[in-house]
């Protein structure tokens, strides 16, 4: 006997009618669901193992993309019509931001774990502090003549604070 579409044993329920939105899938939302289950059960060992596994998968997916973007940075800068005076700085900025993209992707998984543990106040304070830090460092470095590269160093400081504070 054959089952009709949308009634099979699926973890996300029956197929919604055409024209309705399905919940987003992928690494992040899937990891969030399991982080929530493990947090509810108080299972920190499984949460840690999931964080390590998903972070490794994210790195394996994001790293090749970041490498291609870094290699194509001069062409991307030209495509974006950067002025000749800013072409070199913009190219370097794109290349420097690629490792930060990797760090930010892994930090996103860590933030999902913290959120699953219902530590929203901590995340809000952390976000406010790192935004203030970014603005202060960016204004200082740009005013000192560091230009676009100064924005990178400000972002690096911001991500470092986020990572250290979240792991503490």
Image: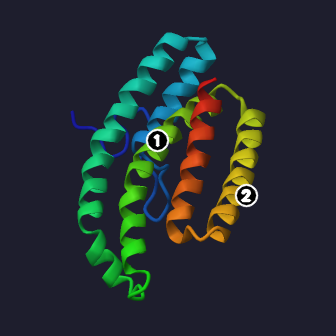
Instruction: Report the residue at 50% width, 19% height from top.
Output: 47
User: Disc 1 vs disc 2: Cβ atoms closer than 8 Å?
Assistant: no
Q: Earlier in the sequence, mark 1 or mark 2?
A: 1
Instruction: Report the residue at 49% width, 26% height from top.
Output: 34
Percent position of residue 4, x then y: 30, 44
Q: How is the image coloured?
A: rainbow
Name the residue beneath numbered marker 1.
Answer: 28
The image shows residue 56, relative to residue 61, as above or below, that is above
Instruction: Report the residue at 55% width, 71% height from top.
Output: 147
Where residue 114 sits, quadrant-wise, is top right
Q: Residues within 10 Å of mark 2 (few under 14, many from 20)?
A: few
Percent position of residue 52, x then y: 40, 25
In the image, 165 versus 120, the foreground residue is: 165
The image shows residue 53, relative to residue 57, as above or below, that is above
In the image, 27 versus 92, the foreground residue is: 92
CA gap, disc 1 and disc 2:
30 Å
Name the residue beneath numbered marker 2.
Answer: 136
Percent position of residue 19, x then y: 46, 65
Percent position of residue 120, x then y: 73, 35
The image shows residue 50, relative to residue 86, as above or below, that is above
Quadrant containing the N terminus in the rendered view: top left
Q: Residues within 10 Å of mark 1 (few under 14, many from 20)?
A: some
Instruction: Report the residue at 54% width, 55% height from top.
Output: 153
Q: Is residue 157 visible?
A: yes
106 displayed left or right of 133: left
The image shows residue 43, relative to residue 152, as above or below, that is above
Query: What kind of element bears circle 2?
Result: helix
What is the residue that sits farthest to the front in this orientation? 144
Query: What kind of element bears circle 1?
Result: helix
């Amino acid at each position: 006997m054959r089952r009709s579409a949308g009634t099979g044993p699926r973890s996300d329920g029956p197929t919604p009618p055409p024209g309705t939105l399905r919940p987003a899938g992928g690494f992040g939302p899937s990891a969030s669901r399991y982080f929530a289950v493990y947090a509810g059960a108080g299972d920190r060992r499984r949460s840690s193992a999931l964080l390590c596994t998903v972070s490794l998968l994210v790195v394996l997916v994001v790293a090749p993309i970041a490498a291609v973007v870094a290699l194509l940075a001069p062409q991307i800068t030209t495509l974006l019509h950067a002025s000749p005076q800013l072409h070199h700085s913009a190219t370097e900025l794109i290349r420097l931001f690629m490792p930060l993209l990797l760090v930010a992707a892994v930090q996103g998984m860590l933030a999902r774990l913290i959120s699953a543990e219902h530590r929203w106040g901590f995340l809000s304070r952390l976000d406010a502090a790192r935004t203030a830090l970014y603005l202060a460092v960016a204004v200082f470095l740009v005013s000192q003549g560091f230009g676009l590269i100064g924005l990178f160093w400000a972002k690096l400081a911001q991500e470092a604070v986020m990572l250290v504070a979240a792991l503490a």
